[in-house]
Every structure is written in structure tokens, then in C-alpha cells.
Image: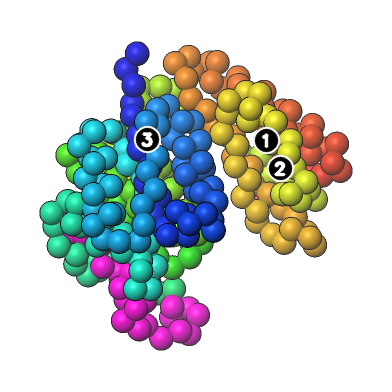
Amino acid sequence: MDYWFAEIITIGNEILSGKTVNTNASHIGRRLTSLGFTVRRITVVMDEINEIANAFKDAINRRPKVIISSGGLGPTWDDRTAEGLAKALGVELELNNSAFEMIVNKYNKMNIPLTEERKKMAFLPNGAYPVENYEGIAPGIYIYYQNIDILATPGVPREMENVLENFVTRYLRNRPNLRYYEEYLYTQGVMESAIAPYIKTLVKKYDVYIKTHPKSYELTNPILEIQIATSGTNEEEVKNKVKGVKAELENIVRSLNGIIKSSL
């Protein structure tokens, strides 16, 4: 079998100390697996430039198709991922005009001044591209290096998930020679927390990727966009699996007195 290997790096002292559970790594792992990658290694390192740089260097030396990190892209002094990645690649950090424009526009909309700490999030390794982050401020960092897709995402889970999806949709070059298929289900009247245990069961039962994206308020008017995706060698089987899971989810939503919508 031709394995398409991937590696995950999570960065943060709070993970190593046990204060924060590493849910980002499990989410990234599920998403990569749904695309047909085999996740070979998950590494956790502290917020220190050399540790970060060495983690990226070691991963690059193992020649995976994809490396994805989470954490360390914020404005504070201990957000060092951009610096660590630049050191690993042997390039300098530079003010990225596209990233700077993204950040300035977001702060302007909120009437918040741009400080040097906030401007820091626009400094990317030379040759990198900013990946859109519609859930927060700091853009992701994407660079194609030695035929490896490298992505750094923020550590806040909803931001990581958003940047990851934007990367998969718009930037990912290395894709397994598998058939990938996804569909979306739109619901109203069912809280994300209420449908969560059913989704957990379906994921284990069918080995598919299912992600709920809340589009309104959980308690007053819950509206969900539910993504269902998987990959495989047989296109018809892949489509049928996704459609079958979607049909089961629709029945679950109705049993919970929810409404199926054609779109949002």
C-alpha cells in the first residue's frame, strides 16, 4: 500500500503540564485520516523557539506529505511558532503584506488600535502564505517546502478548525490518490450538545469524519451546519457511505424534534 504519511505538532506549555487536553491533535488527526492520510506521529513541544524548530526539522527529515501544527500564533511574547518554523526552514521572518492587511482590517472593524504586539501576527517565514482565519485574528501560516505541505494553525480550537478547513480547500497540494467526498446537512432546533453523542456513535460505526459548525445561539435558536466526509478507493462506495450517514443523521435530527433545512 502507498501510504501518504502526515505528522502533527502541537505547541504549548499548557498541554505539557496537563492543564489543557490536546483536543486539537485529535481533530487534526481525524481530518487528515478522512482525506486518506496516515498520521504517523503526534509531537508536543513547549513554547520555546529551539524546541519548535527541532520539532519541525525532525518531522521534515521523516519526509511526510503534510505537517500540521497548532498553537503559538498569537500576539503574546510566548507565541513563538512563526519564529520556530522560520528557524527550521533556515529563512527569516518578514512582514507579510497580505497577512498584515487581514489583521488591520479585522482590528479596524472592531475599532481597536494596531499595536506592535498585534502587528507581530503578520510576520511570517519568508516564502509563506497567510491562511484565512474567519474565527479569529491570527492567520494560519502555509508554506510548501521540499514537496511537503506545512501548515501552522492557531491554538484556539474553533480558529484551528477554520484555518485547517481553509487550508484543505484552498492550499493543500499533496492529496492521496483516493476518492474524497463530502456533503453538508443543515439543521435548526437541535443543540450541538444534544446531537454530539449520536455523532460520536456514527463516527465510530462508519469511520467517517463528521463536524458540527454552529451558526447561531446554542440555547435560543440552535442552527447547525454538519459536515460529513470520507475517502476511499471506490468512488461509488465513498458517496454511498456519506449519503447513508447523512440519512441517519436526518432521522436523528427529526427524532430530536429538529428541522432539516435545504441551506442556511
Counting other residues with Cα less than 10 Å from the Cα at mark 2, is it few (<14), some (14-19), or many (20 or more)?
few
Residue nearest the viewer, comparing 231 with 152: 152
Q: Residue at x 33, y 48 (%)?
A: 151
Q: Is residue 46 visible?
A: yes
Mark 1 neighbour density, 10 Å: few (under 14) some (14–19) many (20 or more): few
Q: Are marks 2 and 3 in contact (CB under 8 Å)?
A: no
Q: Amino acid at mark 2?
A: Ala
Residue at 69 percent of width and 36 percent of height: 199
Quadrant hosting residue 41? top left
Is residue 60 found left or right of 159 in the rendered image? left
Observer-nearest of 133 and 24: 24
Q: What residue does disc 2 label?
A: 196
Circles 3 and 1: CB distance less than 8 Å?
Answer: no
Q: CA distance from mark 3 to mark 1?
A: 23 Å
Q: Disc 3 vs disc 1: which is toward the camera?
A: 3
Q: Quick one: quadrant of the N terminus?
A: top left
Q: Amino acid at mark 1?
A: Lys
Q: Are marks 1 and 2 in contact (CB under 8 Å)?
A: yes
- What residue is disc 1 on? 200
Instruction: Label 2, secondary structure: give it.
Output: helix
Whether residue 170 is visible here, answered yes or no, is no
Read off the magenta span: 107-131
How far across and down, in percent of the image, does residue 247 sit?
A: 72, 28
Element type at mark 3: strand
The residue tagged 3 is 41
